[in-house]
């Protein structure tokens, strides 16, 4: 295990475990509080994220930031990352082998940060972290506890851009996360 995020980030920048590294502009490691109580995990970088090297800076990220402001979540207090650290071509869903190649990096991030809550943004994050037996529609909004971490599956912000009807569910899930954090005096 790598002991700090900076060293792990340098290793990720040199990674060639899968073909995603061939098309990237920048790796998108993660951003936020290195001691965060809440971690958000998405699918993978899009075009804006690939260009800037930071997760959730495009349209979906802006929507997520608006929800954070409305709920009272400070982006700087949480940690945000993705299953894969390089952009899949045409923003397609990462293949199983691509996700598998990056999962050790993600596990290492979790071990360094030690979050109390992990928010799984979308089906790809949910299935890669908790298993194929879970589905985002049936699991979202329900706490799942494993190995002393509480998981909250919810819709990926990009899904909200395609289907505005999902916004209320996403909002309600963030309210549950904020409530849990407030009840436990966790920084959010």
Image (cartoon, helix red, strand yellow):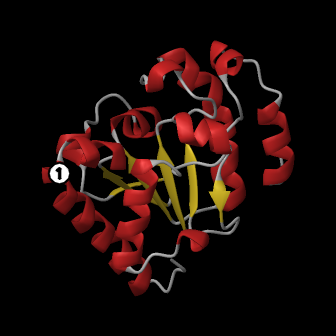
**Residue at x-position 44% and y-position 65%:** 65
Task: Report the front residue among 85 and 64.
Answer: 64
Q: Is residue 31 above or below residue 186?
A: above
Question: With 31 as the anchor, is 169 left or right in this view?
Answer: left
Point 22% across, 67% down: residue = 172
Task: Indicate the position of residue 31 as horizontal and vertical percent values.
Answer: 65, 57
Q: Which residue is nearer to you in this view: 53 or 156?
A: 53
**Numbered label tally:** 1
The image shows residue 100 at horizontal and vertical percentages of 57, 23
Of 167 and 148, nearer the camera is 167
Q: Residues within 10 Å of mark 1 (few under 14, many from 20)?
A: few
* Residue 11 horizontal side relative to residue 188, left or right: right
- Percent across and percent down for residue 146 are 44, 52
Q: Determine whether, in the image, residue 111 is placed left or right of residue 115.
A: right
Q: On the rendered image, what quadrant is the N terminus found in?
A: top right
In terms of image quadrants, where is residue 34? Answer: bottom right
For label 1, the SS is helix
Name above or below for residue 181 compared with residue 171. Answer: below
Residue 51 appears anywhere in the view: yes
Residue matched to label 1: 164
Residue 170 location (% of width, % of height): 26, 59
> Can I make out residue 1 in this image?
no
What residue appears at the point 46 percent right and 21 percent down from the top-left corner? 90
Q: Residue furthest left?
A: 165
In which image quadrant can residue 35 be found? bottom right
């Amino acid at each position: 295990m790598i002991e700090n995020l900076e060293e792990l980030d340098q290793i990720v920048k040199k990674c060639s475990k899968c073909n995603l590294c061939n098309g990237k502009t920048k790796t998108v490691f993660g951003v936020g509080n290195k001691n965060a109580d809440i971690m958000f995990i998405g699918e993978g970088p899009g075009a804006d994220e690939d260009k800037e090297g930071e997760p959730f800076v495009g349209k979906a990220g802006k929507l997520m930031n608006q929800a954070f402001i409305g709920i009272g979540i400070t982006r700087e207090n949480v940690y945000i990352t993705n299953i894969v650290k390089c952009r899949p071509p045409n923003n397609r869903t990462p293949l199983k082998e691509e996700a598998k190649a990056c999962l050790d990096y993600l596990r290492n991030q979790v071990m360094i940060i030690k979050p109390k809550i992990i928010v799984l943004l979308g089906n790809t994050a949910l299935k890669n972290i908790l298993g194929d037996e879970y589905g985002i529609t049936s699991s979202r909004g329900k706490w799942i506890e494993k190995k002393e971490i509480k998981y909250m599956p919810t819709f990926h912000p990009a899904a909200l851009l395609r289907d505005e009807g999902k916004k209320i569910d996403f909002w309600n899930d963030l309210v549950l996360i904020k409530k849990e954090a407030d009840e436990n005096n966790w920084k959010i």
